[in-house]
Image (cartoon, helix red, strand yellow):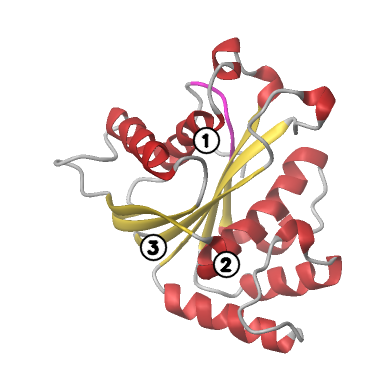
Amino acid sequence: MTYSFGAIDEVGQTGFKFAHGSSRLFAISLALTNEPQRIRDNLERARRQLGLASGVELKFHSTPHGLRLKLLEQMAAWPLAVRILGVDKTGLPLDFHRLKSWEFYAFFVAELLNRLPVGELERTTLALDEFGPPRLTLHLIRAHLRQRQLWGEKSYLIKRLAFRRSHREDLIQVADLCGGAIYRWLADGDETYYRLIRDKALVWAYHPGKTNPLT
């Protein structure tokens, strides 16, 4: 299926100072849909049903366990697909250690998009949660996408690529919640949340030259 709109968020840290709190795992999460306004309306309805303030920003790490379950249970019925690329940083070569955080981020955004099944992108608008210096980061993402023939004058896969504030774009919050659920499974083997959206998800573990999903 081709999707007209997608939202991207990241989970975990880009750094390599594992002894000082850097996460072993980093992930890029993507929520895809053809009905972005319906998803926004559904999320606002879910907030009301759960007794949350209108427009309150939802993040996986700060949402209580019970609310996470209820939100993800509802999302399982929404018209969306979830795609995520997990990166075990302990296995990356030293070249990655030398990258700035936004360079690291840009590379793996492109790597995830390059793994999507043929046909899922076509004139797709992508909204990304703000990360790094906006102009430089977007420029580098586009450069990586050109290398993979996903961006350019002869490519019609991505219509627009732009940063948005997550509190102003509900689809980024959906990508955060789904990404957090899958990240918990990738990092700890905990399927508590992932099982609720498993049927909507494709998950990859980053290995150069290997593009088959785990699920």
Amino acid type of the residue that numbered disc 1 sits on in the rendered structure: Tyr
Outermost residue, top side: 94
Q: Disc 2 or disc 3, which is closer to the eye?
A: 2
For label 2, the residue is: 167
Residue appearing at x 68%, y 88% in the figure: 48
For label 3, the residue is: 5
Amino acid type of the residue that numbered disc 3 sits on in the rendered structure: Phe
Residue 161: percent from left, percent from top: 34, 51
Q: Quadrant of the C terminus?
A: top right
Residue appearing at x 70%, y 53% in the figure: 180
Front residue of 209/143: it is 143
Amino acid type of the residue that numbered disc 2 sits on in the rendered structure: His
Q: Are marks 3 and 1 in contact (CB under 8 Å)?
A: no
Outermost residue, left side: 154
Q: Which residues are magenta?
A: 204-208
Residue 193 drawn above or below residue 68: above
Residue appearing at x 67%, y 18% in the figure: 91
For label 1, the residue is: 105
CA neighbours of label 3 inside 10 A, class few (<14), some (14 to 19), many (20+): many
